[in-house]
Image (spheres, helix red, strand yellow):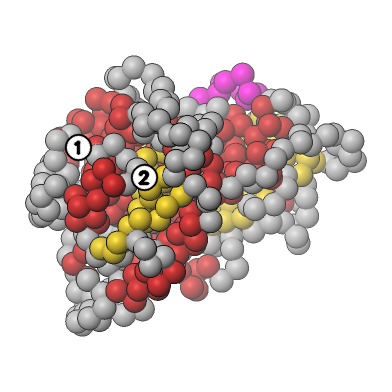
Amino acid sequence: MKKDALTLSRRDFLLAAAATALAPPLVVQASKKKFGPNDKLNHACIGVGGMGWGDLQQFGKHPRVNIVALCDVDAVRLKKASDAFPQARTYTDWRELLEKEGDKIDSVNVTVPDHNHFAIAIQAIRNGKHVYCQKPMCHDVAEVRVLTEAAVKAGVVTQLGTQIAASKGDRTAVQWIKEGAIGKVKHAYLCSNRPGAVETYRLVGPRPAQGQEAPSTLNWDLWVGTAPMRPFSPDIYHPTKWRAWQDFGTGWSGDIGCHIFDAVWKGLGLKPPKSVIADVQKSWEESAERRGDTWPQGNHITWSFPGNKMTASRTLPVEWFDGEFYPPEEIRALFSVADYPAESAMLIGTKGALLIPHGGMPVLLPGDKFRDYKAPELDERNHYHHFADACLGGPKTESHFAQSGPMTEAILLGTVAIRVPGKLLEWDAANLKFPNHPDAERYLSRIYRDGWRVAGL
């Protein structure tokens, strides 16, 4: 693949994304390549530092996975991964990896900053590769729509990196919701108020007036990728602070929201929301400089979803809280205000409530009423290995794109609402439009930097 073959105007991108909504219903296809009982999956890891290092370790532990190629723009991280898997071929540019590896690889994982997810994943899918992509699936709503449809059409195995979805806790919560343990659901409260997160990850900005030369071990041009070029500056972008910047990340709700939303989405069988609105940190809202560059350090997002047989009314309000915004005290008091899980979902039903702590076992409330309610017997499951098993012909994945794509779209609509705080955005999912606020549609997609635009959509 030529490096300049990656072109698409914002208008064309939105048209292509909207067109997928008119396609037949999504059907998850099985892997096309047939593997024998002793065959192995040849896997390439794109991004091997930070979360990528963890992903590499997990895939490397699967007995039927060969790690055959590694890619990272950071030479220090790449060397560490290469030392651990010396048999793997190494690359700095993911485009070169996909071109040179060709039929020598069956699958890839995409574990890089959000702004480059789509470009890598769409090309891998077009090349017929199975794709495990870290969350959120993409940086923008329109990208998610196109990537979801492309994955289904190609018939490849996919998995979103919501590894907690494979846990007994989340799977138990999904089953309890589906079997109606708390009756019809009236309201959902989601939160991520992780201690220290604001100080560690959520930078105020603005970006420095002048940057400096990137370290010789970091290919800054490849790191920036599809985003507008800006000078390198230490300690605020690579390796861990990039999520704070609109060009690179999707804010706290775009990141952690994929985890907290997952069991709620699956259990209730939600469809695209009817509307979304956000309140944000006042200091961010009042600063034009910050609003154009960083994400706020606190958000309160409210979606209105269409009701279904699992809900108590024709619409279901779902609220998200992070930073300085917390779920109402009376909701936290259903469990314990003092000990309320910092990252969790609380569903209020007609017969009780369900608390789903991130990474923990769900709790039916009030406890006395549900003391004898039985939890399902579930096997242990590894999210990464489940993907590899599906590639090898096993059961379909827990978070395939046909399911997690629409969820990611809804979450990223929240990030659009953040950028126009206080405005109720009515959502036309079929056409990717906000009929009452068309000015907000500019946040549904981006124009990629020259040399990184995606062709053929």
- 383 vs 232, nearest the viewer: 383
SS assignment at label 2: strand
Q: Position of residue 90 (x, y in %)?
A: 29, 64
At label 2, the amino acid type is: Ser
- The outermost residue toward the front is 38
Check if residue 304 falls in the magenta segment: yes
Which residue matches tag 2? 107
Residue numbers of the magenta segment: 303-314
Q: CA distance from mark 1 to mark 2?
A: 26 Å
Residue located 56% across and 71% down the image: 196
Residue located 69% across and 56% down the image: 341
Dominant secondary structure of the residues highlighted in magenta in the image: loop
At label 1, the amino acid type is: Phe
Q: Is residue 382 visible?
A: yes
Instruction: Determine which quarter of the picture holds residue 231.
Output: bottom left
Instruction: Determine which quarter of the picture holds residue 18.
Output: top left
- The numbered mark, 1 or 2, whose residue comes first in the sequence reads 1
SS assignment at label 1: helix
Front label number (1 vs 2):
2
Label 2 crowd bin: few (<14), some (14–19), many (20+), radius 10 Å: many
Q: Locate residue 196 relative to residue 18 in the image: left or right.
A: right
